Amino acid sequence: RKEVEQDPGPFNVPEGATVAFNCTYSNSASQSFFWYRQDCRKEPKLLMSVYSSGNEDGRFTAQLNRASQYISLLIRDSKLSDSATYLCVVMGGNNRKLIWGLGTSLAVNP
Amino acid sequence: GAGVSQTPSNKVTEKGKYVELRCDPISGHTALYWYRQSLGQGPEFLIYFQGTGAADDSGLPNDRFFAVRPEGSVSTLKIQRTERGDSAVYLCASSLMPGLSGANVLTFGAGSRLTVL
């Protein structure tokens, strides 16, 4: 089993749709969780950190379920500019190594 | 600097040649990471520096790969006897010292695209 798993997609959705991505991780001692966004041929950029209580930033909501070891990202009212790959990232409990998922590709269509 | 700077942005070389890739992290960031990313894949961890020392080099694929950070700022990733399989985008990232607020957040450079012919 991979340490961090994501559905690679692609997800093709119309503008205005709500889309949800899930990510599972294998190390129960993991401490920190993030969603990064990567545009085609660009570097990854932090979208949001994921906190135990869940957090929201505008149209984006991230949630963490420690018992089931999964993280989710919800995007509401999708925009064309949301088209990108969304990478789930987990930091181990005892080291600073970030474990990256392979990413989920999103295409928002007009 | 304002962001993480990587040079060269593109490097084409022949199999068997030696390559150096440079990373200039954000000023004040003591942690520096090298990742490698192939098309359709997530970033693959190579090495992590805390200051001048390599705190974790477990991701370096073999002894052809080496990285240094002699003064705790700029880092150079060195690849000897390049092979076609080394072709990828090499990403550098930096972050604040562990323990500080926001230290787990990495800021990436634009990457160095290496093509080995």
Image (tube, rainbow, N blue to C red):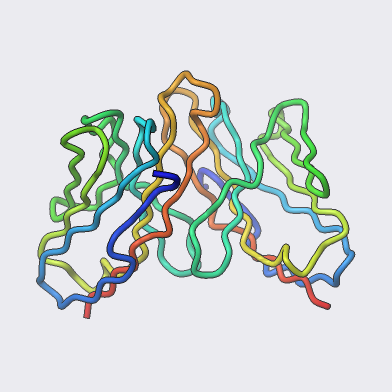
Residue found at the far bottom of this picture: B117
Residue found at the far top of this picture: B99
Query: Split into 4 quadrants, where in the image is the N terminus of chain B?
Result: top left
Task: Where is residue A110? Give x, y as percent.
Answer: 83, 78
Residue found at the far front of this picture: B1
Relative to B88, is A99 on the left or the right? right
Q: Is residue A29 above or below residue B40?
A: above
Please tell me which residue is depicted at 13% across the width and 51% down the height of the picture: B63
Query: Split into 4 quadrants, where in the image is the C terminus of chain B?
Result: bottom left
Q: Is residue B105 above or below residue A79?
A: above
Tally of marks = 0
B23 or A33, nearer to the observer: B23
Relative to B6, is A8 on the left or the right? right
Q: Is residue A5 above or below residue A50?
A: below
Relative to A76, is B98 on the left or the right? left
Please tell me which residue is depicted at 34% across the width and 30% down the height of the picture: B30
Please tell me which residue is depicted at 41% across the width and 65% down the height of the picture: B38
Task: Where is residue B73? Give x, y as percent.
Answer: 27, 37
Instruction: Tell me which corner region of the image, top left, top right, bottom left or bottom right, holds residue A51.
Output: top right
Task: Where is residue A97? Give x, y as percent.
Answer: 42, 35
Task: Where is residue A30? Give x, y as percent.
Answer: 55, 29
Instruction: Tell me which corner region of the image, top left, top right, bottom left or bottom right, holds residue B78.
Output: bottom left
Relative to A97, is B69 on the left or the right? left
Please tell me which residue is depicted at 16% across the width and 63% down the height of the picture: B19
